[in-house]
Amino acid sequence: MNRKRQTRPSNPSRRDVLKRAGQAGLALAAAPLALSGCSKSTDTSGGKASKGGGGGGSIKVGILHSLTGTMAISEISLKDAELMAIEEINKAGGVLGKQIDPQIKDPQSKFTDVFPEKAKELLLKDKVAAVFGCWTSVSRQNVLPVFEENNGLLFYPVQYEGNECSKNVVYTGAAPNQQILPAVEWLMSPEGGSKKKFYLLGTDYVFPRTANLIIVKYLESKGLKAVNEKYTGFGFKDYQNIVQDIKKADPDIIFSTINGDSNVNFYNELAAQGITADKVPVCAVSVGEDELRGLDPPKVKGHLAAWNYFQSIDTPENKKFVANFKAKYGADRVTDDPIEAAYYQVYFWKLLVEKAGSTDVDKVREAMKARIEFDAPEGKIWLDPKTQHTAKYFRMGKTRDDKQFEIVHTTAIVEPDPYPQVAFPGWHCDWTKGGVTKGSKVDVS
């Protein structure tokens, strides 16, 4: 199998942009040896960006999500969830007796230039105490140097590929051992249908490529091989040839890491060519309830999604969260996994600041050594002091007629590991003991 085979849109300007975006993201995360995010800061005074945050009766925080462009379909709701949490905290008295003052920036789904530009603006001009932001890994990788160089603190709410452990990031979405690997393990189990013929399809950037590397390595450890692996660009629309190739490859599962509004065209084309969930199910790791709003129920019914949270979780905490979100933004709105993580990460920051008694980044980071817990809509979770990732539950959902998910599998809480050993042997992260232990160089291509 050729891991470099891919399909791209024909629009030259988009192709050039995606090429630069992919190269930038891969350069930063492809090989663990290049992980600048895991070096120690030499700034012990609180950091260049950590002494601001607001004056008088307020503390400034940044919100950095695409409100326009191809990722707006997913990121607008993250902004909404963060604003709802800020409003709740402010009504309850704020943080350290001060109100939170959100500074909202729109990086326009432009990952390589506008994202870092707006991040720098938030840290150096607005003097925010923390930033809640990003969706794609290429956007996170492109803002990471800004946060490291200026000792800022980014809270990142989306599942990702691992192979990173920056002390300037709090990761509130799933690490690969909390979503990618348990999804594959369940699909290969009798409960999941004993799947063996995986077709890997994703958007062409660092998350899908690294996620698929992990899957390939895991399949190899079981004596299996993916039937094919393909990539399309952001905003890709024409999936006719891709679906024809899927039919030719004859998989028993399509593992999708497609991101953004391309999912609408992908599922529509599957249905148009007669691929339904009872024949060849899709297991998606970037399609939640928010993305399902733009899809016809008959075209997605029965397909799978691997997440840590679903709106259909039947607990008092989740029912309250869902009701509050709908009351604020409309009865037609939904919650999903990244929305939930975007919401509770604001509370994580609040608890850390209160533990530290300060918004100073170095003091907040020191407060992470105490295990911060929170009763989130998905259940009781905590922030792992070693990795600055979140301990979370894994759940598999099956799409229903009402564009919600029937939860068909739930695990006990899973502690995070950004370096699954099946793909990154010898690599470990422990910020209570100095940071990252390096293993062998890993090529993601």
Image (tube, rainbow, N blue to C red):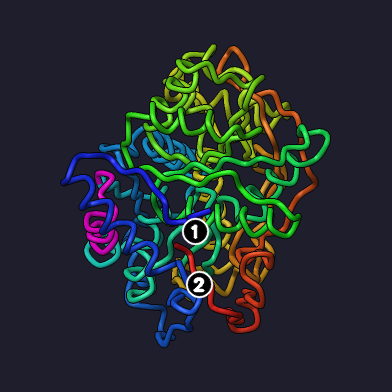
Which residue is painted at 44% across and 62% down in the image? 445
Disc number placed over residue 96 in the picture, else none? 1
Q: Residue furthest front?
A: 248
Instruction: Give the CA separation, mark 1 to mark 2.
Output: 24 Å
User: Residue 251 placed where, x, y %?
Assistant: 62, 34
Query: Magenta span has 167?
Result: no
- Mark earlier in primary sequence (1, 2): 1
Q: Is residue 87 above or below residue 385?
A: above
**Mark 2 residue type:** Lys
Q: Is residue 99 visible?
A: no
In which quarter of the view is residue 264 placed?
top left
Q: Which mark is residue 167?
A: 2
Q: Residue furthest left?
A: 13
Disc 1 crowd, CA 10 A, few/some/many (<14, 14-19, 20+): some
Residue 295, given in percent of the width and then of the height, sits at 45, 19
Which of the 4 image quarters holds residue 21? Answer: bottom left
Specify start and end residues of the magenta stretch as a single range.
Answer: 108-121
User: On the image, which quarter does residue 148 sit in?
Assistant: bottom left
Element type at mark 2: loop
Query: Residue at the location (49% across, 44% down)?
Result: 342
Q: Nearer the viewer, mark 1 or mark 2?
A: 2
Q: Amino acid at mark 1?
A: Leu
Whether residue 106 sits left or right of residue 334 in the image: it is left
